[in-house]
Image (spheres, rainbow, N blue to C red):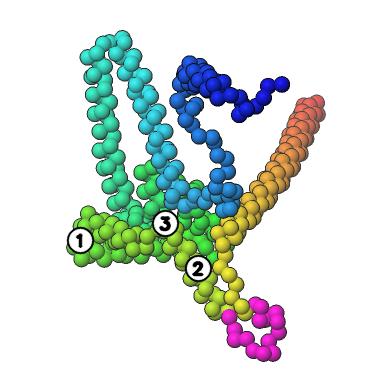
Amino acid sequence: QNPPNNSLPRPSRRILTTRLKKLTRTILLPALLSLPLTLSLRPAKITNAMGPNLRGPVIEKEIRGMPLAKIMAADAARKEMAEENAATNKEASRIFKEEGEEAHAAYLKKVDAERARKSAQKKVDREALIEKLLIEEGYDPWRSMKGKAVMFEFDYGIDLYQVPGTEQEAFENLKRVFPDKYDDRVLERQRLQTLNEVESMMDEGMSKSEIIKKFQQEGEKMEHLTGNPETMKLKMMREKNKKKKAEKKQPVREETPAEDVAAAVPQPEPTAEEIAAKEKEAKLKAKADAKAQKEKAKADAKALKEKKKAETKAAKETAAKEKAAAKAAVVAAAAGAAAASAGASAGASAGASA
Protein backbone atom coordinates (compact mmCIF):
# COMPACT_ATOMS: atom_id res chain seq x y z
CA GLN A 1 0.00 0.00 0.00
CA ASN A 2 1.37 3.42 -1.04
CA PRO A 3 1.85 5.94 1.73
CA PRO A 4 0.04 9.33 1.62
CA ASN A 5 1.53 12.22 -0.38
CA ASN A 6 2.51 14.15 2.70
CA SER A 7 4.67 11.16 3.78
CA LEU A 8 6.71 11.15 0.53
CA PRO A 9 10.24 12.46 0.63
CA ARG A 10 10.78 16.04 -0.45
CA PRO A 11 12.45 15.16 -3.81
CA SER A 12 9.59 12.81 -4.70
CA ARG A 13 7.02 15.47 -3.88
CA ARG A 14 8.87 18.02 -6.00
CA ILE A 15 8.90 15.64 -8.93
CA LEU A 16 5.16 14.93 -8.53
CA THR A 17 4.34 18.66 -8.39
CA THR A 18 6.39 19.33 -11.52
CA ARG A 19 4.56 16.58 -13.40
CA LEU A 20 1.16 17.92 -12.35
CA LYS A 21 2.06 21.43 -13.55
CA LYS A 22 3.24 20.05 -16.87
CA LEU A 23 0.05 18.01 -17.23
CA THR A 24 -2.02 21.10 -16.52
CA ARG A 25 -0.17 23.23 -19.10
CA THR A 26 -0.18 20.63 -21.85
CA ILE A 27 -3.62 19.00 -21.53
CA LEU A 28 -6.10 20.65 -19.15
CA LEU A 29 -5.50 24.31 -20.02
CA PRO A 30 -5.84 23.89 -23.85
CA ALA A 31 -8.99 21.84 -23.27
CA LEU A 32 -10.55 24.61 -21.16
CA LEU A 33 -9.56 27.30 -23.65
CA SER A 34 -11.15 25.36 -26.49
CA LEU A 35 -14.56 25.46 -24.80
CA PRO A 36 -17.10 28.15 -25.94
CA LEU A 37 -16.89 31.37 -23.99
CA THR A 38 -20.59 31.35 -23.18
CA LEU A 39 -20.38 27.82 -21.90
CA SER A 40 -17.45 28.56 -19.61
CA LEU A 41 -18.58 31.97 -18.32
CA ARG A 42 -22.39 31.71 -18.22
CA PRO A 43 -23.64 31.53 -14.63
CA ALA A 44 -25.97 28.82 -13.52
CA LYS A 45 -29.65 29.51 -14.17
CA ILE A 46 -31.44 30.62 -11.04
CA THR A 47 -35.05 29.55 -10.83
CA ASN A 48 -37.60 31.21 -8.60
CA ALA A 49 -35.06 33.83 -7.55
CA MET A 50 -37.82 36.21 -6.42
CA GLY A 51 -39.91 33.58 -4.73
CA PRO A 52 -43.60 32.89 -5.44
CA ASN A 53 -45.90 35.45 -7.08
CA LEU A 54 -47.65 37.01 -4.09
CA ARG A 55 -49.78 39.35 -6.22
CA GLY A 56 -51.70 36.50 -7.76
CA PRO A 57 -52.83 36.28 -11.39
CA VAL A 58 -53.16 39.53 -13.33
CA ILE A 59 -56.66 39.90 -14.76
CA GLU A 60 -56.83 42.03 -17.88
CA LYS A 61 -59.55 44.66 -17.84
CA GLU A 62 -62.27 44.18 -20.44
CA ILE A 63 -62.22 46.84 -23.14
CA ARG A 64 -65.65 48.33 -23.82
CA GLY A 65 -67.26 51.49 -25.11
CA MET A 66 -65.42 53.99 -27.27
CA PRO A 67 -61.96 52.49 -26.63
CA LEU A 68 -63.26 49.24 -28.12
CA ALA A 69 -64.89 51.12 -31.00
CA LYS A 70 -61.59 52.88 -31.80
CA ILE A 71 -59.73 49.55 -31.78
CA MET A 72 -62.34 48.07 -34.11
CA ALA A 73 -62.04 51.11 -36.39
CA ALA A 74 -58.24 50.81 -36.52
CA ASP A 75 -58.48 47.09 -37.32
CA ALA A 76 -61.03 47.73 -40.08
CA ALA A 77 -58.89 50.50 -41.60
CA ARG A 78 -55.78 48.32 -41.43
CA LYS A 79 -57.60 45.43 -43.11
CA GLU A 80 -59.02 47.66 -45.84
CA MET A 81 -55.62 49.21 -46.54
CA ALA A 82 -53.93 45.80 -46.67
CA GLU A 83 -56.49 44.47 -49.14
CA GLU A 84 -56.24 47.59 -51.30
CA ASN A 85 -52.43 47.48 -51.30
CA ALA A 86 -52.44 43.78 -52.15
CA ALA A 87 -54.73 44.34 -55.13
CA THR A 88 -52.68 47.35 -56.28
CA ASN A 89 -49.37 45.48 -56.01
CA LYS A 90 -50.76 42.50 -57.89
CA GLU A 91 -52.00 44.65 -60.76
CA ALA A 92 -48.77 46.70 -60.77
CA SER A 93 -46.67 43.53 -61.03
CA ARG A 94 -48.77 42.28 -63.92
CA ILE A 95 -48.46 45.58 -65.79
CA PHE A 96 -44.68 45.70 -65.18
CA LYS A 97 -44.22 42.18 -66.61
CA GLU A 98 -46.58 42.56 -69.58
CA GLU A 99 -46.37 46.26 -70.52
CA GLY A 100 -43.07 47.49 -69.16
CA GLU A 101 -41.67 50.02 -66.71
CA GLU A 102 -43.32 53.11 -68.21
CA ALA A 103 -46.80 51.59 -68.01
CA HIS A 104 -46.02 50.49 -64.46
CA ALA A 105 -45.09 54.05 -63.42
CA ALA A 106 -48.18 55.45 -65.15
CA TYR A 107 -50.40 52.96 -63.31
CA LEU A 108 -48.94 53.88 -59.90
CA LYS A 109 -49.42 57.57 -60.71
CA LYS A 110 -53.04 56.86 -61.64
CA VAL A 111 -53.57 54.98 -58.37
CA ASP A 112 -52.19 57.89 -56.32
CA ALA A 113 -54.42 60.35 -58.18
CA GLU A 114 -57.49 58.17 -57.59
CA ARG A 115 -56.72 57.94 -53.87
CA ALA A 116 -56.34 61.71 -53.65
CA ARG A 117 -59.63 62.16 -55.48
CA LYS A 118 -61.45 59.76 -53.14
CA SER A 119 -60.00 61.51 -50.09
CA ALA A 120 -61.10 64.92 -51.33
CA GLN A 121 -64.56 63.61 -52.23
CA LYS A 122 -64.99 62.01 -48.81
CA LYS A 123 -64.11 65.34 -47.19
CA VAL A 124 -66.79 67.08 -49.26
CA ASP A 125 -69.33 64.36 -48.45
CA ARG A 126 -68.47 64.64 -44.75
CA GLU A 127 -69.13 68.38 -44.71
CA ALA A 128 -72.43 67.83 -46.54
CA LEU A 129 -73.43 65.13 -44.02
CA ILE A 130 -72.66 67.44 -41.08
CA GLU A 131 -74.78 70.18 -42.61
CA LYS A 132 -77.66 67.78 -43.26
CA LEU A 133 -77.56 66.34 -39.74
CA LEU A 134 -77.36 69.67 -37.93
CA ILE A 135 -79.23 72.18 -40.11
CA GLU A 136 -81.94 69.97 -41.61
CA GLU A 137 -82.49 67.09 -39.18
CA GLY A 138 -81.45 68.61 -35.84
CA TYR A 139 -78.85 66.04 -34.74
CA ASP A 140 -75.71 67.57 -33.23
CA PRO A 141 -72.75 65.63 -34.77
CA TRP A 142 -70.56 66.36 -31.72
CA ARG A 143 -72.95 65.98 -28.77
CA SER A 144 -76.11 64.07 -29.68
CA MET A 145 -76.20 60.30 -29.43
CA LYS A 146 -77.42 59.65 -32.95
CA GLY A 147 -75.29 62.39 -34.52
CA LYS A 148 -72.08 60.97 -33.08
CA ALA A 149 -73.05 57.46 -34.18
CA VAL A 150 -73.76 58.59 -37.76
CA MET A 151 -70.46 60.46 -38.03
CA PHE A 152 -68.43 57.59 -36.54
CA GLU A 153 -69.95 55.11 -38.97
CA PHE A 154 -69.25 57.46 -41.89
CA ASP A 155 -65.62 57.95 -40.83
CA TYR A 156 -64.73 54.39 -39.83
CA GLY A 157 -67.58 52.08 -40.88
CA ILE A 158 -68.35 51.01 -37.29
CA ASP A 159 -71.92 51.08 -35.93
CA LEU A 160 -71.74 52.34 -32.33
CA TYR A 161 -75.16 50.82 -31.61
CA GLN A 162 -73.54 47.39 -32.02
CA VAL A 163 -70.41 48.05 -29.91
CA PRO A 164 -70.74 46.81 -26.29
CA GLY A 165 -70.44 49.54 -23.68
CA THR A 166 -71.16 52.61 -25.81
CA GLU A 167 -73.90 55.03 -24.82
CA GLN A 168 -75.82 54.07 -27.96
CA GLU A 169 -75.76 50.35 -27.12
CA ALA A 170 -76.62 51.02 -23.47
CA PHE A 171 -79.60 53.19 -24.46
CA GLU A 172 -80.91 50.50 -26.81
CA ASN A 173 -80.68 47.94 -23.98
CA LEU A 174 -82.59 50.27 -21.66
CA LYS A 175 -85.27 50.71 -24.31
CA ARG A 176 -85.70 46.94 -24.57
CA VAL A 177 -85.74 46.33 -20.83
CA PHE A 178 -87.73 49.41 -19.77
CA PRO A 179 -89.81 50.41 -22.80
CA ASP A 180 -92.19 52.52 -20.70
CA LYS A 181 -89.40 54.65 -19.22
CA TYR A 182 -86.86 54.90 -22.04
CA ASP A 183 -87.99 55.58 -25.60
CA ASP A 184 -87.22 57.84 -28.53
CA ARG A 185 -89.11 60.76 -27.01
CA VAL A 186 -85.94 61.84 -25.20
CA LEU A 187 -84.01 61.95 -28.47
CA GLU A 188 -86.89 63.75 -30.15
CA ARG A 189 -86.88 66.50 -27.50
CA GLN A 190 -83.13 66.95 -27.99
CA ARG A 191 -83.61 67.09 -31.75
CA LEU A 192 -86.31 69.75 -31.53
CA GLN A 193 -84.19 71.78 -29.13
CA THR A 194 -81.27 71.67 -31.56
CA LEU A 195 -83.51 72.75 -34.43
CA ASN A 196 -84.75 75.69 -32.34
CA GLU A 197 -81.17 76.73 -31.58
CA VAL A 198 -80.25 76.56 -35.26
CA GLU A 199 -83.31 78.58 -36.23
CA SER A 200 -82.50 81.23 -33.61
CA MET A 201 -78.94 81.54 -34.91
CA MET A 202 -80.17 81.88 -38.47
CA ASP A 203 -82.59 84.59 -37.36
CA GLU A 204 -79.62 86.40 -35.85
CA GLY A 205 -77.97 86.47 -39.29
CA MET A 206 -75.46 83.65 -38.84
CA SER A 207 -74.58 81.58 -41.90
CA LYS A 208 -74.69 77.78 -42.02
CA SER A 209 -70.90 77.52 -41.84
CA GLU A 210 -70.81 79.82 -38.79
CA ILE A 211 -73.52 77.77 -37.05
CA ILE A 212 -71.66 74.52 -37.76
CA LYS A 213 -68.40 76.01 -36.46
CA LYS A 214 -70.11 77.20 -33.26
CA PHE A 215 -71.62 73.77 -32.57
CA GLN A 216 -68.26 72.15 -33.25
CA GLN A 217 -66.46 74.46 -30.81
CA GLU A 218 -69.05 73.83 -28.09
CA GLY A 219 -68.88 70.07 -28.63
CA GLU A 220 -65.07 70.01 -28.47
CA LYS A 221 -65.15 72.23 -25.40
CA MET A 222 -67.56 69.90 -23.61
CA GLU A 223 -65.47 66.85 -24.52
CA HIS A 224 -62.36 68.58 -23.17
CA LEU A 225 -64.08 69.54 -19.91
CA THR A 226 -65.79 66.24 -19.26
CA GLY A 227 -62.83 64.08 -20.26
CA ASN A 228 -63.61 60.46 -20.91
CA PRO A 229 -67.32 60.06 -21.79
CA GLU A 230 -67.44 56.61 -20.22
CA THR A 231 -66.09 58.00 -16.94
CA MET A 232 -68.69 60.77 -16.98
CA LYS A 233 -71.45 58.23 -17.58
CA LEU A 234 -70.36 56.22 -14.55
CA LYS A 235 -70.20 59.39 -12.45
CA MET A 236 -73.72 60.35 -13.50
CA MET A 237 -75.00 56.87 -12.67
CA ARG A 238 -73.39 56.99 -9.23
CA GLU A 239 -74.75 60.46 -8.51
CA LYS A 240 -78.20 59.30 -9.56
CA ASN A 241 -77.99 56.26 -7.28
CA LYS A 242 -76.84 58.44 -4.37
CA LYS A 243 -79.74 60.81 -4.95
CA LYS A 244 -82.25 57.96 -4.96
CA LYS A 245 -80.80 56.53 -1.77
CA ALA A 246 -80.89 59.92 -0.10
CA GLU A 247 -84.57 60.33 -1.00
CA LYS A 248 -85.46 56.88 0.31
CA LYS A 249 -83.42 57.18 3.50
CA GLN A 250 -85.54 57.80 6.63
CA PRO A 251 -84.35 58.74 10.16
CA VAL A 252 -83.84 55.60 12.29
CA ARG A 253 -85.43 55.60 15.75
CA GLU A 254 -84.80 53.30 18.67
CA GLU A 255 -88.08 51.49 18.20
CA THR A 256 -87.48 50.99 14.50
CA PRO A 257 -87.44 47.28 13.64
CA ALA A 258 -84.17 45.73 12.64
CA GLU A 259 -85.42 45.13 9.11
CA ASP A 260 -86.15 48.84 8.61
CA VAL A 261 -82.79 49.78 10.06
CA ALA A 262 -81.06 47.47 7.62
CA ALA A 263 -83.09 48.89 4.75
CA ALA A 264 -82.21 52.45 5.79
CA VAL A 265 -78.47 51.79 5.74
CA PRO A 266 -77.00 52.94 2.40
CA GLN A 267 -76.05 50.05 0.20
CA PRO A 268 -72.65 49.97 -1.54
CA GLU A 269 -72.50 51.22 -5.10
CA PRO A 270 -72.77 48.55 -7.75
CA THR A 271 -69.45 47.28 -8.99
CA ALA A 272 -68.49 46.79 -12.60
CA GLU A 273 -69.17 43.06 -12.25
CA GLU A 274 -72.67 43.72 -10.89
CA ILE A 275 -73.39 46.17 -13.68
CA ALA A 276 -72.16 43.63 -16.23
CA ALA A 277 -74.32 40.93 -14.60
CA LYS A 278 -77.38 43.20 -14.77
CA GLU A 279 -76.69 43.98 -18.40
CA LYS A 280 -76.28 40.27 -19.12
CA GLU A 281 -79.58 39.52 -17.33
CA ALA A 282 -81.27 42.27 -19.31
CA LYS A 283 -79.89 40.85 -22.56
CA LEU A 284 -81.12 37.36 -21.64
CA LYS A 285 -84.56 38.74 -20.78
CA ALA A 286 -84.67 40.68 -24.04
CA LYS A 287 -83.60 37.55 -25.93
CA ALA A 288 -86.33 35.48 -24.20
CA ASP A 289 -88.94 38.17 -24.95
CA ALA A 290 -87.85 38.28 -28.58
CA LYS A 291 -88.07 34.49 -28.79
CA ALA A 292 -91.56 34.53 -27.24
CA GLN A 293 -92.67 37.26 -29.63
CA LYS A 294 -91.24 35.30 -32.54
CA GLU A 295 -93.11 32.15 -31.47
CA LYS A 296 -96.31 34.14 -30.95
CA ALA A 297 -95.95 35.73 -34.39
CA LYS A 298 -95.33 32.29 -35.88
CA ALA A 299 -98.45 30.91 -34.17
CA ASP A 300 -100.52 33.91 -35.29
CA ALA A 301 -99.28 33.49 -38.85
CA LYS A 302 -100.17 29.80 -38.77
CA ALA A 303 -103.65 30.57 -37.40
CA LEU A 304 -104.15 33.25 -40.03
CA LYS A 305 -103.07 30.81 -42.72
CA GLU A 306 -105.52 28.18 -41.46
CA LYS A 307 -108.25 30.80 -41.31
CA LYS A 308 -107.58 31.93 -44.87
CA LYS A 309 -107.48 28.30 -45.98
CA ALA A 310 -110.88 27.64 -44.36
CA GLU A 311 -112.32 30.82 -45.85
CA THR A 312 -111.01 29.86 -49.28
CA LYS A 313 -112.51 26.37 -48.94
CA ALA A 314 -115.87 27.81 -47.83
CA ALA A 315 -115.79 30.30 -50.70
CA LYS A 316 -115.11 27.48 -53.17
CA GLU A 317 -117.98 25.42 -51.74
CA THR A 318 -120.33 28.42 -51.90
CA ALA A 319 -119.26 29.14 -55.46
CA ALA A 320 -119.81 25.50 -56.39
CA LYS A 321 -123.30 25.56 -54.86
CA GLU A 322 -124.16 28.79 -56.62
CA LYS A 323 -122.84 27.38 -59.87
CA ALA A 324 -124.91 24.22 -59.41
CA ALA A 325 -128.00 26.28 -58.57
CA ALA A 326 -127.46 28.48 -61.59
CA LYS A 327 -127.01 25.44 -63.78
CA ALA A 328 -130.19 23.91 -62.39
CA ALA A 329 -132.02 27.17 -62.99
CA VAL A 330 -130.78 27.24 -66.58
CA VAL A 331 -131.88 23.64 -67.09
CA ALA A 332 -135.28 24.38 -65.54
CA ALA A 333 -135.70 27.45 -67.67
CA ALA A 334 -134.76 25.51 -70.76
CA ALA A 335 -137.21 22.78 -69.82
CA GLY A 336 -139.97 25.34 -69.23
CA ALA A 337 -139.24 27.00 -72.51
CA ALA A 338 -139.33 23.68 -74.29
CA ALA A 339 -142.63 22.79 -72.62
CA ALA A 340 -144.11 26.14 -73.54
CA SER A 341 -142.97 25.78 -77.11
CA ALA A 342 -144.43 22.29 -77.27
CA GLY A 343 -147.77 23.55 -75.92
CA ALA A 344 -147.87 26.38 -78.39
CA SER A 345 -147.20 24.01 -81.25
CA ALA A 346 -149.91 21.68 -80.07
CA GLY A 347 -152.43 24.54 -79.84
CA ALA A 348 -151.57 25.71 -83.24
CA SER A 349 -152.05 22.25 -84.67
CA ALA A 350 -155.43 21.93 -82.99
CA GLY A 351 -156.60 25.27 -84.38
CA ALA A 352 -155.51 24.30 -87.81
CA SER A 353 -157.42 21.03 -87.60
CA ALA A 354 -160.55 22.87 -86.53
Residue shown at the point (28%, 63%) measured from the top left: 199
- Foreground mark, 3 or 1? 3
Q: Quadrant of residue 45?
A: top right
| Residue under numbered circle 2 | 238
Q: Is residue 117 left or right of residue 59?
A: left
Residue 164 visible in the current orientation: no
Q: Position of residue 303 (x, y in %)?
A: 71, 46
Residue shown at the point (67%, 90%) measured from the top left: 254
Measured along the vertical axis of the image, is residue 148 above or below residue 154? below
Residue shown at the point (74%, 36%) measured from the top left: 320
Measured along the vertical axis of the image, is residue 107 above or below residue 169? above
User: Which residues are the magenta region?
Assistant: 249-263
Amino acid under disc 3 = Met
Cβ atoms at labels 2 and 3 below 8 Å apart:
no
- The kind of secondary structure element at disc 2 is helix
Q: Residues within 10 Å of mark 2 (few under 14, many from 20)?
A: some
| Cα gap from disc 2 to disc 1, whole angstroms | 40 Å
Q: Quadrant of residue 246?
A: bottom right
Measured along the vertical axis of the image, is residue 103 above or below residue 295? above
Of mark 2 and mark 3, the one earlier in the sequence is 3
* Label drawn at residue 252: none
* Label drawn at residue 145: 3
Q: Is residue 319 left or right of residue 82?
A: right
Amino acid under disc 2 = Arg
